[in-house]
Image (cartoon, helix red, strand yellow):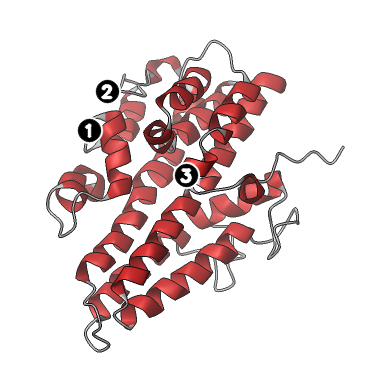
């Protein structure tokens, strides 16, 4: 996990426009530059984390729970932030008003898109991937936000259509040296990338509260929450505490309505809407 262990120099102190805002949400909340690495390695070892906030005691989980923590922690804590880092690195290298000297930032931008998507999605995004693109597609089937209009239960997530429009726009803005516009686009991309994490948190809160979920579901909820709690905390420490109390590792009970309300209370601060989120869908 070279990126995660080197995050301090790549995102907080060693880059041209450091510190990067989204990384600082996580650094301020967890109190560690290596929070993503620490989360996964603690799960492997069955140990406790030692964060400023959002701690987890993975000794409470067997293999079913640890598997979910490790798999989701790798993708949604580590790779998630690496995607954002690549976009920020592109902005650092952007030369304003220069059409013929922005190959390096465009390359960095495209790397971010690659890490968002993964290598097994296929050219049309219809493959069975394992990274953030596939997560958005999975959640759209739960929230009826698939398709170009976001009204379907299958197909590519509306979120992915929107993000790939923004990816193409950002690429063009960087290539043409429109660095301020590319920065605005990057902000919009980062805002949207939190949506599947919130959807996942609410979904597994519901599974624990209403469907008597077990260790696997509890671990999935804890992992999704860990991937978004720092951003929620920056908007409302009270909302973040409510979500953590209900979805933390070892939570004695889960109030899904309280979790949903806590998330909804910060949507304006996060720059997202209820329409983008959708709602858990039940065909019955």
Whichever of callouts 3 and 1 sits on the residue coming sooner in the sequence is 1
CA neighbours of label 2 inside 10 A, class few (<14), some (14 to 19), many (20+): few
Residue 110: quadrant of the picture: bottom left
CA distance for labels 3 and 1 = 23 Å
- Seen at 37% across and 24% down, the residue is 54
Q: Which mark is residue 270?
A: 3
CA distance for labels 2 and 3 = 22 Å
Question: Is the residue under label 1 in contact with that under label 2 (CB below 8 Å)?
Answer: yes
Residue 257, compared with residue 235, is above or below; it is above
Residue 131 can be seen in this image: no
The local secondary structure at tag 2 comes to loop
- Seen at 64% across and 61% down, the residue is 156
Q: Nearer the viewer, mark 2 or mark 3?
A: 3
Whichever of callouts 2 and 3 sits on the residue coming sooner in the sequence is 2
Q: Residue furthest left?
A: 14
Residue placed under numbered mark 2 in the picture = 52
Query: Residue 121 location in percent, x, y?
Result: 54, 64
CA distance for labels 2 and 1 = 8 Å
Query: Residue 128 location in percent, x, y?
Result: 58, 58
Q: Nearer the viewer, mark 3 or mark 1?
A: 3
Residue 158 can be seen in this image: yes
Image-based side of 105 in relation to 265, left or right: left
Query: Residue 35 location in percent, x, y?
Result: 28, 35
Image-based side of 123 in relation to 43, left or right: right
Q: Which mark is residue 32?
A: 1
CA neighbours of label 3 inside 10 A, class few (<14), some (14 to 19), many (20+): some
């Amino acid at each position: 996990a070279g990126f995660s262990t080197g995050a301090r120099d790549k995102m907080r102190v060693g880059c041209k426009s450091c510190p990067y805002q989204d990384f600082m949400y996580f650094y301020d909340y967890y109190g560690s530059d290596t929070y993503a690495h620490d989360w996964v390695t603690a799960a492997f070892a069955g140990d406790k984390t030692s964060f400023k906030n959002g701690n987890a005691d993975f000794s409470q989980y067997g293999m079913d729970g640890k598997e979910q923590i490790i798999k989701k922690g790798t993708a949604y804590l580590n790779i998630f932030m690496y995607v954002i880092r690549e976009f920020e690195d592109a902005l650092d290298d952007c030369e304003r008003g220069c059409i013929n000297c922005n190959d390096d930032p465009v390359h960095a931008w495209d790397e971010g898109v690659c890490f968002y998507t993964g290598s097994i999605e296929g050219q049309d995004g219809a493959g069975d991937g394992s990274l953030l693109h596939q997560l958005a597609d999975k959640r759209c089937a739960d929230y009826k936000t698939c398709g170009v209009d976001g009204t379907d239960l299958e197909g590519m997530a509306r979120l992915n259509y929107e993000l790939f429009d923004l990816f193409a726009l950002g690429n063009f803005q960087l290539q043409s040296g429109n660095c301020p516009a590319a920065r605005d686009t990057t902000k919009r991309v980062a805002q949207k990338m939190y949506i599947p994490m919130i959807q996942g948190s609410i979904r597994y809160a519901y599974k624990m509260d209403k469907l008597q979920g077990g260790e696997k579901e509890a671990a999935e909820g804890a992992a999704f929450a860990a991937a978004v709690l720092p951003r929620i905390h920056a908007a409302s420490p009270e909302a973040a505490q409510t979500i953590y109390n209900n979805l933390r590792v070892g939570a004695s009970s889960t109030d899904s309505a309280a979790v949903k309300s806590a998330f909804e209370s910060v949507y304006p601060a996060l720059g997202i809407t209820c329409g983008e989120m959708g709602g858990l869908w039940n065909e019955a």
